[in-house]
Image (tube, rainbow, N blue to C red):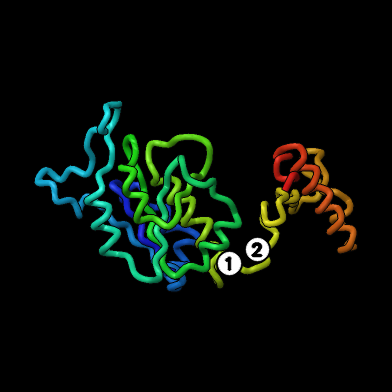
Amino acid sequence: MKIDILTLFPEMFDGVFTESIIKRAREEGKVEINLVNFRDYTLDPHNKVDDTPYGGGSGMVLMCQPIFDCVKSLRTPDSKVILLTPSGKVYKQSMAYDLSHEKHLIIICGHYEGFDERIKSICDLELSIGDYVLTGGEIPAMILVDSITRLIDGVITLESHINDSFNNNLLDYPTYTKPRVYEGMEVPEVLLNGDHKKIEEYRLSEQIRITKENRPDLLDK
């Protein structure tokens, strides 16, 4: 997979994509990640990429021209263009699975007060990572890339993500490791007896309990 991230602040990504699983995936050629500063595409003599909004209001709005030209230079028939915006569909694990099968993603990071509405016309998907507002789309882009990359074939084992939270509309079950007792807290006995059927039943019941407590909305699905 190839991922191009359009951003005005490529330095924000330093370290995020050069460590751990994403670093290994890049080194093994499973994912190619490019940071593209769309300011390089502006035709403005002062390198402007934003301007004041028509109709008045606070803040600055990202202009069409630099982003349009940048996307046109990168887009191929295999590309899927994603706009990160609070008004987009809320990102979910099922979307991460779908996007992990794409050949080329172009992710546009917003900044300042927002985008010229016409930029949406060149996008295939508008995504939000939650019901809150950040200073820009860089952190959401990091989240997308991390959540998608780990699902690409061969990046991690299938077993490592098949039981992830949200895969069955339930949160994940609790896990434990050595020592068996720590500061008076013991590992549940059912996990120690080797009865895999009972372990599966316990884990499912814990998923339901935790989901009821923390995300009852998921049970409605």
Question: Which circle marks residue 53 in the picture?
Answer: none
Question: Which circle marks residue 156 in the picture?
Answer: 1
In the rendered image, the vertical position of residue 212 relative to residue 91, given as above or below? above
Work out which residue is located at the far left of the displayed protein and give it.
45
- Tag 2, which secondary structure? helix
10 Å crowding of disc 2: few (<14), some (14-19), many (20+): few
User: In this rendering, would 89 be left or right of 16?
Assistant: right
Q: Position of residue 54 (x, y in %)?
A: 25, 33
In the rendered image, the vertical position of residue 207 relative to residue 56, given as above or below? below
Who's the residue at 46% across and 41% down the image?
A: 87
- Check disc 2 and report the residue beneath it: 160
User: In this rendering, would 87 be left or right of 77?
Assistant: right
User: In this rendering, would 188 be left or right of 87?
Assistant: right
- Three-letter code, disc 2: Ser
Who's the residue at 45% across and 54% down the image?
A: 125
Between 123 and 85, the one nearer to me in the picture: 123
Work out which residue is located at the far top of the displayed protein and give it.
57
- Three-letter code, disc 1: Ile
Between 118 and 181, the one nearer to me in the picture: 118
In the rendered image, the vertical position of residue 151 relative to residue 65, given as above or below? below
Q: Position of residue 106 (x, y in %)?
A: 38, 59
- Tag 1, which secondary structure? loop
Instruction: Tell me whether circle 1 and circle 2 mark residues in contact (CB < 8 Å).
Output: yes
Between 96 and 82, the one nearer to me in the picture: 82
Where residue 5 sits, quadrant-wise, is bottom left
Who's the residue at 34% across and 43% down the image?
A: 117
The CA distance from mark 1 to mark 2 is 7 Å
Who's the residue at 39% across and 66% down the image?
A: 79
